[in-house]
Amino acid sequence: MSYTISDSTMDDALDAKVPDGPIQEKWDNHRFSIRLVNPANKRKYKIIVIGTGLAGASAAATLGELGYEVQVFTYHDSARRAHSIAAQGGINAAKNYPNDGDSIFRLFYDTVKGGDFRSREANVYRLAQVSNEIIDQATAQGVPFARDYGGLLDNRSFGGAQVSRTFYARGQTGQQLLLGAYQALARQVGSGQVQLHNRIEMLDVVVKEGRAVGVVVRDLITGEITSHSAHAVVLATGGYTNVYFLSTNAMACNVTAAWRAHHKGAYFADPCFTQIHPTCIPASDEHQSKLTLMSESLRNDGRIWVPKDREDARAPNDIPEDDRDYYLERQYPAFGNLVPRDVAARAAMRVIDSERGIGPLENGVYLDFKNSIDRLGEGTIEERYGNLFEMYERITDEDPYSVPMRIYPAPHYTMGGVWVDYNLQTTIPGLYALGEANFSDHGANRLGASALMQGLADGYFVLPYTIGDYLADWLNTEPVPTDDPAFTRAEADIADRTKRFLDIGGTRSVDWFHRELGKIMIEQCGISRSREGLEKALGEIPALEQEFWNDLRVLGDDMSVNQSLERAGRVADFFELAQLMCRDALDREESCGGHFRIEHQTEEGEAKRDDENFSFVSAWEWSGEGEAQHLHKEALAFEYVKPTQRSYK
Amino acid sequence: MDLTLRVWRQAGPKAAGDFKTYHVEDVSRDASFLEMLDQVNEALNAQGEEPIAFDHDCREGICGMCGVMINGTPHGPQRGTATCQLHMRKFSDGDMITVEPWRAAAFPVLRDLVVDRSPFDRIIESGGYITAPTGSAPDANLIPVPKDAVDSAFDAAACIGCGACVAACPNSAANLFTAAKIAHLNLLPQGQAERWNRTVAMVETMEEWFGSCTNHGECETACPQEISIDFIAWMNADYVRAQFKNPSKTGRDNL
Ligand SMILES: Cc1cc2nc3c(=O)[nH]c(=O)nc-3n(C[C@H](O)[C@H](O)[C@H](O)COP(=O)(O)OP(=O)(O)OC[C@H]3O[C@@H](n4cnc5c(N)ncnc54)[C@H](O)[C@@H]3O)c2cc1C
Ligand code: FES
């Protein structure tokens, strides 16, 4: 199969609505110029929020506090369980409490540079601006961030930054931030302002006369399919990393909500921008169901190395210093073990590809704490990373206090997602996307501790303002009734699709297909990509997808808990997404951030960007069943951070 | 290793359930308990029998979604470990393992090993928060908090809400869960304004749903986060003080 580059031009119709003015003033000006909904009118509006991760819970709680009537849906059994709960390392903010030279501008600069100049400057600047308020907000809610002996907040450093700006709560920062947001949401639920629907999966966005008017959902306990209408719909449904099957994401993470919106007209942006995290526990066997992250913060105190000699079979502690290759410190003296994730992951991959990997399957590198333990004592290391060390030991049966950890890169995060403008509105008016579900702030590579920041920025401080500007038009209108054909048609489509999975009656399980899809994706559209491999994948995926629709076996019915049925719908959407990711990766004839095309590298094997031709966001428009999506391009301009070849040497 | 499983199968909330026996072969010692169940489910699906429904998500011991009784013990034999983090190396070849859902009146079975734990959310909604509407917060370093206070608050805040404490308790009490949240918030300076009302509201909501604590201490043993039952004593003390003279009226902890 051969493939031609998509035909498209820079797209004026794709208006990012970035406000005018100097970057420092854009957000202020914008907040002043957009329309507000007056407090007494807010209760006249209904808003649907899908998802209760950091982005969804913070948005729903805040919208409830403001007086909107909010309905929230999550497929989890409680709002507290969202994937955000698993974030370990921390959250960035430009507080500059350590007085080490940080500022809003520096956080902005680092994030744009870290994203390899593929993000929208104005969004990133706003993110840096509101970062400080997030820390204040979370602290007021009782989030137990780490403190020093004087009782003030403590910071650590994280990959891709030379300042300490990361706030953390042991190795459970996501848990504590999510509990803060969940509790704020619970307060609204308790007061009746917000209605929360658990174990309900959203399966379609309903669009009428070009705007989002509601959703269709399926009750995961009873199978009942129902419609819900509102003045606006907010998706905060997380990322799509599980397209790779094996990843650090929670098992249920999926693209369905975003993908259904894409079918209804929401453009999908930069799908090939995915992040492989350098420090995860290597897979141990065939039955492995997921990969476990070992927080990047470990790179602060751990040193990464492999034996110099690939034949070296000695136990790690028996290998003397001189026979070790601390390859990150050697290749990147300025940042050493703290280079950004994409750089660290590729360096590990190069080592393993050159057959210097360690461990039973030769699929890892060492992350060694010996020097830090000698310097700081085991107590300090335990205080910083105790729960991670325990988790490591439970999984591998090895004690990282005495034997170096074994780590390996694994799929972790998706920078791509639903295209949104500066207001976080998608290309469907009235439909918004927040958190990992949107594409906006991280460009081609996300820096550590920035996803929590972005999810909470979107939910607490951005959407609650920007949504008012849209709602103002619909004052004193009733939401579209749910017996409208737009709703009943969508309900019927979902009922058909559900039946279709049950009726295939084939031989293979959903997980089998998912695992096979994952293998193709990690091989061809993972840490490195090539034209040849992507073209191969674009041949293999549709064939596997065909087999899925012919040979899937989902037992049971659609009127009770049926977990295979839930997964079937998600995997069906992953098949479509996977093809778009490969096309996007093929089209992007450059390397940038997490997107590494082997055809485009420097002599030292670093990513080689092509700013002249690829300084844009690719935004794909659904063109109908069986048709190839159409590519739109949002041009990116860099006025404040001049694109340079990223260097961490 | 080869194993025999006795697994609780129940088609729905109203259906009667019973144990079914399955033989599983070739389980890797490095597999997690849930990966072992995945393997069983693959085999069941291949044989045309519906897979066992069980809750799980993060598989890292943090989301609190997983949790089953393994040989009568919540989350199984390894202390301080959620079901998803339990690995098969803790079992031996030839073992017979009984797998059941949490058993508690407040947690009805939805299917097989899946239960409804939503009463936990009711407890939080009744007062398990600090009122701090978005935008109202002062600078985070305005109020220094002693490190020890934060550390204790954290030990309580680490609760993952899995329900093992309730499942372990002969009375199906939720005191450890409730106490952990009350302690997290009541120990912090930010939590003082609502301390007494929070305690009363949460304890009373808890009592609507769950049994009474008679100090068996099984909850602490079962807790995957090893949360201490000292927090229960602490909650009880706060509850008594809140009843005895409602300090919320004075805004002072003046007893
Ligand atoms: C192991 C791990 C560690 C991490 N550590 C860090 C870190 O230290 N710092 C950092 O900044 N970032 C970290 N990240 C990234 C970060 O955790 C996530 O990007 C972020 O939490 C995503 O939040 P979210 O609110 O966008 O989505 P999620 O938390 O994924 O929430 C999605 C929500 O949407 C709901 N949902 C989805 N689809 C549907 C549907 N169809 N119907 C109904 N509900 C639906 C789900 O139920 C859930 O409530 C980490 C990620 C992983 C995997
Ligand atoms: S699956 Fe999340 S705690 Fe076990």
Image (cartoon, rainbow, N blue to C red):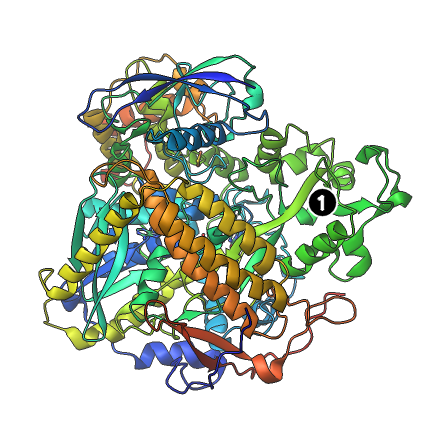
Percent position of residue A644, x then y: 67, 77
Using the rendered image of the protein, determine whether residue A87 is visible from the camera's viewpoint.
no
Please name the residue shown 40% across and 43% down the image.
A510
Work out whether residue A119 or residue A608 is closer to the camera in this orientation and state it. A608
Chain to which mark 1 belongs:
A
- The quarter of the picture where the N terminus of chain B appears is top right
| Residue furthest to the right | A322
Q: Which residue is mark 1?
A: A302
In the image, B113: left or right of A451? left
Judging depth in this view, the residue of B176 and A429 nearest the camera is A429
**From the viewer's perspective, is residue A6 above or below residue B18?**
below
Specify whether residue B175 is in view: yes
Say what amino acid the circle numbered 1 marks: Gly
Q: Using residue A578 as the reference point, say whether residue A222 is left or right of it.
A: left
Q: Position of residue A550 (x, y in %)?
A: 36, 49
Q: Residue at x 71, y 52 (%)?
A: A348
- Return the x and y of residue A199 as percentages of the image width and height: 27, 43
* Figure check: A41 above or below B105: below
The number of discs equals 1
